[in-house]
Amino acid sequence: MARWAMVIDLDRCTACQACVVACQVENNVPPTGVGEAEKGRAISWLRVVPFVDEEAHGTRPPLRLTPLPCQHCDNPPCTKVCPVQATSIDDEGLVAQIYPRCIGCRYCTTACPYTVREFNWKRPEWPEPMEQGLSPDVSIRPKGVVEKCTFCHHRLQRARDRARAENRELQEGEYMPACVETCPSGAMAFGDWDDPRSEVSRLSQSPRAFHLMEELGTEPKVIYLSKGEWGGEV
Amino acid sequence: MEKSEASMQQDAVLLRPIEQTSWKFWVFIGILLAIWLWGMFAWLTQLRHGLEVTGLNVPVYWGLYITNFVFFIGISHAGTLISAILRLSHAEWRRPITRAAEVITVLVLFFGVGCVLLDLGRPDRALNVLKHPNFMSPLLWDVTSISIYLTASTVYLYLPLIPDIAILRDHMPKRRWFYRILSLGWTGSERQHRILEIAIATMAVLVIPIAVSVHTVVSWVFAMTVQPMWHSTIFGPYFVVGAIFSGIAAIIIAMAAIRKVYHLESYLKPIHFNNLGLLLLVMSLLWFYFTFAEFLTTYYGSEPSHMVVFLSKTEGEFAPYFWTMVVACVVIPLALLGNGRTRGTVWGTVVASVSVEIGMWLERFLIVIPSLSRPRLPFAAAHYSPSWVEWSLLASFVAMFIFLYAVFTKLFPIISIWEIREGRERSVLEVSRRVQSYLDSAVPPALDQKSS
């Protein structure tokens, strides 16, 4: 059984936001108007967020821009609080959301310390002709439910179907979320953390590796790499 | 029969609200219904557009609705819990108070539950809570606990109502069929009284742990997460204390209102307000103790993510609300209730109670919002201001609660007639016997003879 994990190398990341755009398109994330965005209701499964480095003092960039997807915690604080079992962690460590069951109580969004769960404040709409480019593999979420990064789970299903049709095992690199595939600076890697030969498990051994808010015991499966001090205030 | 007629005369004022209704009542009801209709319009707006019409945002996913939920459920501790404690401790002054208090509980619980339904993004799927329950979730503990509490406190309100409904059945010209059904064939026989007393006593015992569990699990909705200043071990008892605190204040306000409107001065005397005022004073001190302990512990631990929330309350964005809360929950009640001269008056306790309600609503607001608007990841910090929809729904819930309370007083006696009579006929003897039993055996024989 695989244990899917992502590596984000902050020393390579240029904060170009290509991953953000790729994610929006891949997952049918509706664009938010300016007005709604100003109210703080933009939906984004993957954000590039700024951490202010107050001790930089001109010696290094004062902002640390960090891509922040769902951390797919091994011990997720969100799944246990859901009253209707609409979110759960599967055998391969992916934290999933069942949109048709979610009652929209937003307990999971408040329980998540990473603020990466999104709520549909209104019915999603795409301006013409964007609606023609929607991905057929990803369902559109109705008004009033919570959604989140799935590590492009539909890509895993597709890759697995292909492998099964060809009567072989799933190969390393066959399943890759859209953000990782898109990253132009090669700052992101994805794979099976339990497979000692995978790139992800090799990179996770790096002395530069760390997790966000490790001290909370959430055991995230997103591994960040950074040389020297990073942010420092989280 | 003659005796009963005589005492009917004596307690006639208790039945008067049911017999006759003045035009003022209808005007009052009309105003309440207008506010309620406005709220329903706000609700329809929200149903049509979704939670977009609220002031909520990322990361302040919970706002006024959840604040009101905690507040209303807190108020619900007024009735059943206080009444059960007073009954079990044989506090004789409880007699004119218990029913007015129990009605608050039963009615306000519906509005507490209503707040959660308002907050759902998909209220149409609310039954998923029963179809796919996850008992790991504190929200499901709430569902369980509140349902049990609602059932138990409805039974607990109904049982002592039965003899009074029988009085209505026998004396009211109108709605006889209604009272006949509800009176369950009460004749007032010795046996019926015995069964009723056992039933009430049993419910009173059962209801106390249930009530405590209700506000404990409400607090656990917050405390079971890792969010700053929510993840606290004292939240259970802290919320229960706050609930009883705001609950007693609600009883005092309700009592003062029915006393004035229905001229019940000879039943609800300053001594009743004084005694409840004393309870309120004690709860104010207890609440202060918990709040102080909570904030001092956070301050000394000074974990950065907790301190951000802490400072936003004490000197930042929320400081005006925070210090108003401290004044309203501690300073004003202590000044008014610590002084025997103001505590012994109706206005003194009522002003203190209104102050406590404002303070406790702010307390709920200050628990829910600051922790959410200052999440661990600093980039996500945000401001929240409730929209007109949220305020309108709060107003309409309060109006609807008062409406239902008023309707109750028109259908049933708001002061328990049979318990008042029982008090008149039996209490003095009972209490003097009880006091005697506390004394050592070396009592003067003369006194001993008098009682037996």
Image (spheres, coloured by chain):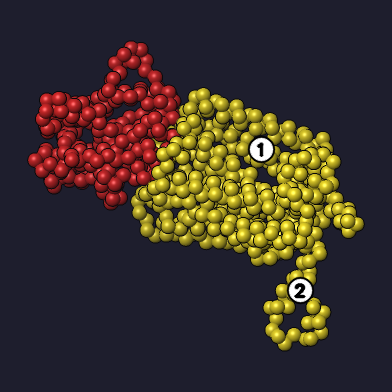
Q: Give the residue at mark 1.
A: B399
Task: Tell which residue pokes out farthest to the top in this image.
Answer: A129
Q: Are marks 1 and 2 on the same chain?
A: yes
Labelled disc at residue B432: 2
Q: Which of B124 and B28 is in front in this view?
A: B124
Dot 2 falls on a residue whose secondary structure is helix
Task: Report whether A204 appears left or right of B178.
Answer: left
Q: In the picture, which chain is yellow? A: B
Task: Report whether A116 appears left or right of B382.
Answer: left
Residues at marks 1 and 2 touching, judged by CB atoms closer than 8 Å:
no
**Dot in front, 1 or 2:** 2
Identify residue type, mark 1: Ala
Instruction: Looking at the image, tell me whether mark 1 or mark 2 is earlier in sequence order.
Output: 1
Q: Chain A is drawn in which colour?
A: red
* Residue B281 in view of the camera: no
Cα distance between the residues tagged 1 and 2 = 44 Å
Dot 1 falls on a residue whose secondary structure is helix
- The chain under label 1 reads B
